[in-house]
Image (cartoon, rainbow, N blue to C red):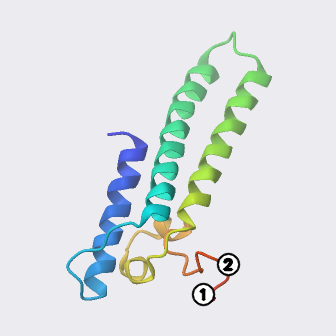
Amino acid sequence: MSAGDDLRAGLDAALAREAKALGRTELVWDEREAFHVDAACAAADSAEILAARIEAAATDPGTSHSDLVRLLAERRQQLAKAAEHLRWLSLPHALSAASDPQKASAGVGSGRSRRTGRPGAG
């Protein structure tokens, strides 16, 4: 299972918790949310591939310092992109029920408005 698959499974579980908290049998991602879920999962997969390349490059004496720095920078950028896409998802009930603080710090269900990015604004 890839990092993107793990992320998608976690987000689907959070969506199921959100539905339960709201007393509904099921919730689904709308088109905008589905786009952000797909993009975050793709970025997570890219970051995972880069992590493997970084590990290989770090142990290869032929790898230049600048090549390693470029790989590290690209991985940081992919992780930032994944987090940026996750900020567009709003799952406040599921987030409060989640026991994993990393999901909270990743921006899942930040409680911010999708339109304005401000708390509580519509």
Q: Residue at x 74, y 22 (%)?
A: 67
What secondary structure is found at the residue carrying circle 2? Answer: loop
Looking at the picture, which amino acid does disc 1 mark? Gly
On the image, the x and y values in percent for residue 98 come to 37, 75
- In depth, the one of 106 and 28 nearer the eye is 28
- Per the rendering, the mark at residue 122 is 1
Looking at the picture, which amino acid does disc 2 mark? Thr
Q: Is residue 106 visible?
A: no
User: What is the residue that sits farthest to the top in this orientation?
Assistant: 62
What is the total number of numbered labels drawn onto the structure image?
2
Q: Quadrant of residue 93?
A: bottom left
Residue at which label 2 appears: 116
Tell me whether circle 1 and circle 2 mark residues in contact (CB < 8 Å).
yes
Residue 100 to residue 113: above or below: above
Residue 70 to residue 105: above or below: above
On the image, the x and y values in percent for residue 79 come to 60, 49
* Mark 2: few/some/many CA within 10 Å (<14, 14-19, 20+): few
Q: In the rendered image, which quarter contains the N terminus? A: top left
Q: Quadrant of residue 9?
A: bottom left
109 relative to 11 in the view: left or right: right
Q: Residue at x 54, y 81 (%)?
A: 111
* Mark 1: few/some/many CA within 10 Å (<14, 14-19, 20+): few
Residue 47 to residue 15: above or below: above
- Per the rendering, the mark at residue 30 is none
Q: Residue at x 45, y 50 (%)?
A: 38
User: What is the residue that sits farthest to the right in this orientation?
Assistant: 66
Mark 1 or mark 2, earlier in chain: 2
